[in-house]
């Protein structure tokens, strides 16, 4: 890549880390425009499009990246996740298989193993696989969020919360991660923190009905808490 392309990608990553969605998109798009046949800028753009739930565009960009670099396991994984989200199970399966073939010991492969076992109800095996994924790549928000939600469902809430929190800290632009953390804070009785995270999710994706339901639940809990204080 040219120094200018590298600079744009790095500044895009920085903007993403700071939660500046628009600036990150502008930077990644600019990198793609000058990248020629380089796949990495398209990987970055496709990934953030997926996180912002623009799945159709994410797929288009990631398919182009895959054509340019068919041996990149991360591109294959991201394309698989996007196809899966869009309901194209066959294309997702192909992309996942290629991911595991290209990088059998990567965090992506351990993540996929964990997810498969979780879907089968093998929570203990899934937990071990996710832990291996975290060991391989400690700052991947998808792994952190997946492990956090699994531990929460297993009743290991003290263990779960740090992973949910780290997912948001490493990726503040994904509304799903913010919503998960907000729901966890709500269950812990930390209503002010829950409000902050759920509202962040609402700002990122105003159309998600799950966020609206969470806000309604939060309003009920806050009202009950105020009534309890007045009664005391």
Image (cartoon, helix red, strand yellow):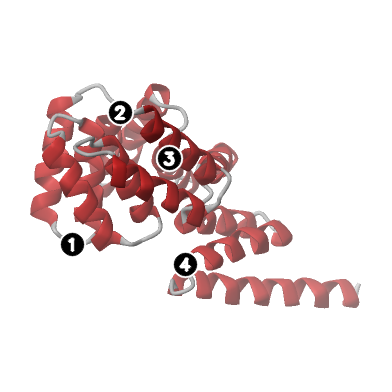
The disc placed on residue 205 is 4
What residue is shown at x 37% (from left), y 35% (from top)? 5
Give the CA distance from mark 3 to mark 1. Answer: 23 Å
In the rendered image, the quadrant that contains the N terminus is top left
What residue is shown at x 52% (from left), y 59% (from top)? 179
**Closer mark to the observer between disc 2 and disc 4:** 2
Give the CA distance from mark 4 to mark 3. Answer: 23 Å
**Closer mark to the observer between disc 4 and disc 3:** 4
Question: Residue 168, relative to residue 178: is it above or below?
Answer: above
Residue that numbered label 3 is attached to: 147
The disc placed on residue 171 is none
Residue 177 percent location from the top left of the image: 48, 52
Disc 3 is placed on an element classified as helix
Mark 1 / mark 2, whichever is N-terminal: 2
Disc 2 is placed on an element classified as loop
Residue 122 shows up from this direction = no
Mark 1 / mark 4, whichever is N-terminal: 1
Residue that numbered label 2 is attached to: 1
**Closer mark to the observer between disc 1 and disc 4:** 4
Mark 3 / mark 1, whichever is N-terminal: 1
Mark 2 / mark 4, whichever is N-terminal: 2
**217 and 28: which one is in front?**
28
What residue is shown at x 28% (from left), y 60% (from top)? 55
The disc placed on residue 87 is 1
Give the CA distance from mark 1 to mark 4. Answer: 20 Å
């Amino acid at each position: 890549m040219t120094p200018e392309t590298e600079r744009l990608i790095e500044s895009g990553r920085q903007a993403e880390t700071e939660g500046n969605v628009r600036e990150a998109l502008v930077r990644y798009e600019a990198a793609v425009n000058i990248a020629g046949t380089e796949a990495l800028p398209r990987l970055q753009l496709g990934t953030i499009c997926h996180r912002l739930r623009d799945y159709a565009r994410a797929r288009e960009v990631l398919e182009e990246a895959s054509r340019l670099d068919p041996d990149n396991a991360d591109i294959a994984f991201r394309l698989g996740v996007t196809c899966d989200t869009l309901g194209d199970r066959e294309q997702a399966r192909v992309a996942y298989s290629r991911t595991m073939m290209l990088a059998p010991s990567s965090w992506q492969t351990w993540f996929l193993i964990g997810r498969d076992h979780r879907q089968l109800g093998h929570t203990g095996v899934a937990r071990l696989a996710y832990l291996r994924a975290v060991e391989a790549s400690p700052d991947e928000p998808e792994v952190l969020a997946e492990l956090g939600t699994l531990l929460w469902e297993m009743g290991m809430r003290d263990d779960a919360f740090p992973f949910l929190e780290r997912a948001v800290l490493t990726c503040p632009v994904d509304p799903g991660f913010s919503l998960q953390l907000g729901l966890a804070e709500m269950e812990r009785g930390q209503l002010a923190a829950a409000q902050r995270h759920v509202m962040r999710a609402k700002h990122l994706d105003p159309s998600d009905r799950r966020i609206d339901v969470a806000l309604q639940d939060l309003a009920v809990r806050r009202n009950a808490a105020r009534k309890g204080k007045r009664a005391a």
